[in-house]
Amino acid sequence: MFKKSVILHIVLLTLLCLVTVDVAAKNFVVVIDPGHGGDKPGAVYPARRPVVFEKQINFAVSKLLYNKLKTESNGITAILTRNKDVDVPFTTRANVANDINANLFMSIHCNSVKNPTTYGASVVVMNEKQMADLDVKYDEITRIERLENFDRSLKMSEYVIEELSQTAGRKILHSGFVQVPNRDLAVLRMTIPPSIIVELDFISNKETREFLTSEEGQEKLADALYNSIIKFRDYISKLDGVEFGNDSDKIE
């Protein structure tokens, strides 16, 4: 009887240790969303061939970023909302982050305007009025969470802007982050975790388009986004008092 009790005690201690290790190894989860896809190519330039599709740039940079996050021992789990050239509904993109309570949702895009001389990177976040209007449909706990995550989205935007300037050599458009009041940015509206849209630069500008489509340019952009995520991970770790582990398990 005593022997069985000792064995049971050892088993329970082992299970407790496994649970403790699992908690300690909790990773910082980043959802990377390559904007557009499939029959929704985003911006298309120039009018003559060879034609550049925004969706291709978005996916190329997203994939590079995903691989950097996945292969480094950084306590980060990276997830892509699409692995190929398909159109993924906004709801599905947002729910990838919502369903696993991700630490960050980053949607990657390129900007475009009629003026071909305009250039510069920026980050788009929800504005406070949009947040207030939308929060009426959520329960009190979720409203508090969304408000807290709004502040975190702003902090992440600072890191992205800093890195796009310093690492990728991008001029920063306006103040850097843009709170758009007159657009229904569905992917941000539907996402509860901290969420941003990164506008890498203007595909409508010939010079920046060449940078966006070059291997060197895409590597620099991916490096910039990687660095910004590392900074945000460290910020959240300190803010929440959480030490993110190096769990090798990845959510595909």
Image (spheres, rainbow, N blue to C red):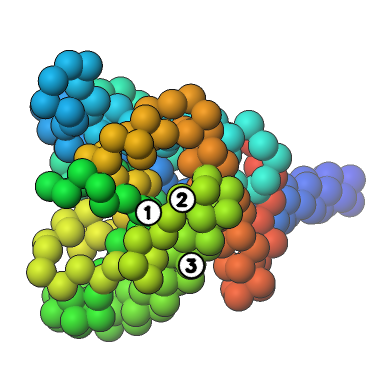
**Between disc 2 and disc 1, whose residue precedes?**
1
Residue shown at 17% from the left, 37% from the top? 43
Q: Residue furthest top?
A: 49
x and y, in percent, of residue 115 in the image: 16, 49
What is the tally of numbered marks visible in this picture?
3
Give the camera-side residue of 17 and 71.
Answer: 71
x and y, in percent, of residue 225 in the image: 51, 48
Q: Nearer the viewer, mark 3 or mark 2?
A: 2
Examine the image and state in which quarter residue 40 appears. top left
Residue shown at 20% from the left, 21% from the top? 51
User: Can you say whether 194 is above or below 247 in the image?
Assistant: below
Residue ID for mark 2: 170
Marks 3 and 2, how far apart at CA:
14 Å
**Disc 3: CA contacts within 10 A as few (<14), some (14-19) or many (>=20):** some
**Disc 1: CA contacts within 10 A as few (<14), some (14-19) or many (>=20):** many
Residue shown at 17% from the left, 59% from the top? 185
Left or right of 60, for residue 168: right
Left or right of 31, for residue 68: right
> Label 1 near label 2: C-beta < 8 Å?
yes
For the question of whether residue 71 can be seen, the reply is yes
Amino acid at the residue labelled 2: Arg
**Disc 2: CA contacts within 10 A as few (<14), some (14-19) or many (>=20):** many
Q: Which mark is residue 141?
A: none
Marks 3 and 1, how far apart at CA:
12 Å
Q: Secondary structure at mark 2?
A: loop
Amino acid at the residue labelled 1: Ala
Residue ID for mark 3: 158
Q: Secondary structure at mark 1?
A: strand
Residue ID for mark 1: 121
Marks 2 and 1, how far apart at CA:
6 Å
User: Quadrant where the C terminus lies?
Assistant: top left
